[in-house]
Amino acid sequence: MLVFVFSVDGPFLQILEQPKQRGFRFRYGCEGPSHGGLPGASSEKNRKTYPTVKVSSSSPV
């Protein structure tokens, strides 16, 4: 997992789970058929996960 944190002071965003890599992505309904939600990198057939972020209000240590 890659986590990039760019903050000196104030809130920051931490990526906990990346989206699963796919060969296709549709941004808008008119671009193609619906293929469900965006699964997380560790998602499996019987255990679905989703991309996850954490917003914190203080600088990471």
Image (cartoon, rainbow, N blue to C red):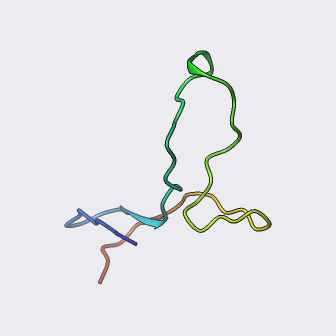
19 vs 56: above or below: above
View extreme (front): residue: 23
27 vs 56: above or below: above
Q: Quadrant of the N terminus?
A: bottom left
Q: Residue 24 vs residue 59: left or right?
A: right
View extreme (top): residue: 30
Q: Residue 6 vs residue 21: left or right?
A: left
Residue at position x 35%, y 72% in the image? 58
Residue at position x 69%, y 30% in the image? 34
Q: Quadrant of the C terminus?
A: bottom left
Q: Quadrant of residue 59?
A: bottom left
Residue 4: percent from the left, percent from the top?
29, 65
View extreme (left): residue: 8
36 vs 47: above or below: above
Residue 42: percent from the left, percent from the top?
59, 68
Name the foreground residue: 56 vs 22.
Answer: 22
Q: Residue 8 vs residue 36: left or right?
A: left
Residue 7: percent from the left, percent from the top?
23, 64
Q: Quadrant of residue 44?
A: bottom right
Name the foreground residue: 22 vs 18.
Answer: 22
Residue at position x 19%, y 67% in the image? 8
Residue at position x 60%, y 15% in the image? 30
Q: Residue 38 vs residue 7: left or right?
A: right
View extreme (right): residue: 46
